[in-house]
Image (tube, rainbow, N blue to C red):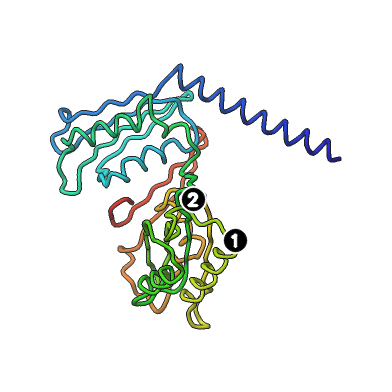
Amino acid sequence: LLFMGWAQEGSMSYSQEMDDEYEKLIRRMNPPRVVIGNESCKNATVIQVDSVNRHGILLEVVQVLTDLNLVITKAYISSDGGWFMDVFNVTDQDGSRITDEAILDYIQKSLGPDSSCFGRSVGVISSTAYTSIELIGRDRPGLLSELSAVLSHLKCNVVNAEVWTHNTRAAAVMHITDQETSYAITDPTRLARVKELLCNVLGGSSRSREAKTQVTHVTTHTERRLHQMLFEDRDYERVGDREDEDERQRPNVSVVNWYDKDYSVVTIRCKDRPKL
């Protein structure tokens, strides 16, 4: 039984390695093509990306653009026969075309043939430089200050942090290091203590949902992970007496199956906001 288990695991690992090598070969033979122009549209910079299609590739392209704080004003997404073509109209935060050569060069390198973007798993980042802490609990004034004070008391540096709040709930992803070494914290006892004290700070009244903390050295793309955390926490559920809210202000989502074309059409109408 042990031998069979090892054989199956070894076979699975070998198969995954073969798939990875095959994907690399296809990509080398058909590298992504990126065209960036400011001539075809007077109000936006047009970015066109052509590449071999695979699951998650659209998300990776969008993450590169949103990490640069670019505003996507219009997008055309199409795929057929194992290929995809995306066209994005983007501006900076002031609504102007992108003219900074450093940013244009970064986009070209991040999405072009020499990028690592198209060769990684969707949104997964592995780091030994810091420890990632995921937190979710009841929102209240001063919460972030209290969390920072606890980490400082435990001799932890906060490298960076991002916090989202919605419907009285708060979710945060914090990257921390050891105060003395400036490296990731790996001691299980110390991490358990950090987790315990942060959870105590996040804990609310008995009426609120439970607080949760998670410590990891592997994290997804921060904003995507925050969305997942709040979704899992069911932050979208309505609280209080809000039934009289104007129906026109609520998001409208419809799904229609087009069986003759073998795909579904998802239509979303809602208020716009950055990085939606």
Task: Determine the residue located farthest toward the right in the rendered image.
Answer: 1
Residue at 37% x, 63% y: name it.
Answer: 164
What amino acid is labelled 1 in the image?
Pro
In whole angstroms, how far apart are the C-alphas of marks 1 and 2?
18 Å
Most foreground residue, 256 or 240: 240
| Mark 1: secondary structure | helix
Task: Determine the residue located farthest toward the front in the rendered image.
Answer: 180
Residue at 29% x, 34% y: name it.
Answer: 107
Residue at 27% x, 40% y: name it.
Answer: 74
- In the image: residue 201, left or right of residue 20: left
Most foreground residue, 225 or 44: 225
Residue 79's place in the image compared with 264, above or below, is above
Q: Position of residue 205 (x, y in %)?
A: 49, 83
Q: Can I make out residue 70 in this image?
A: yes
Most foreground residue, 263 or 51: 51
Residue 219 numbered mark, or none:
2
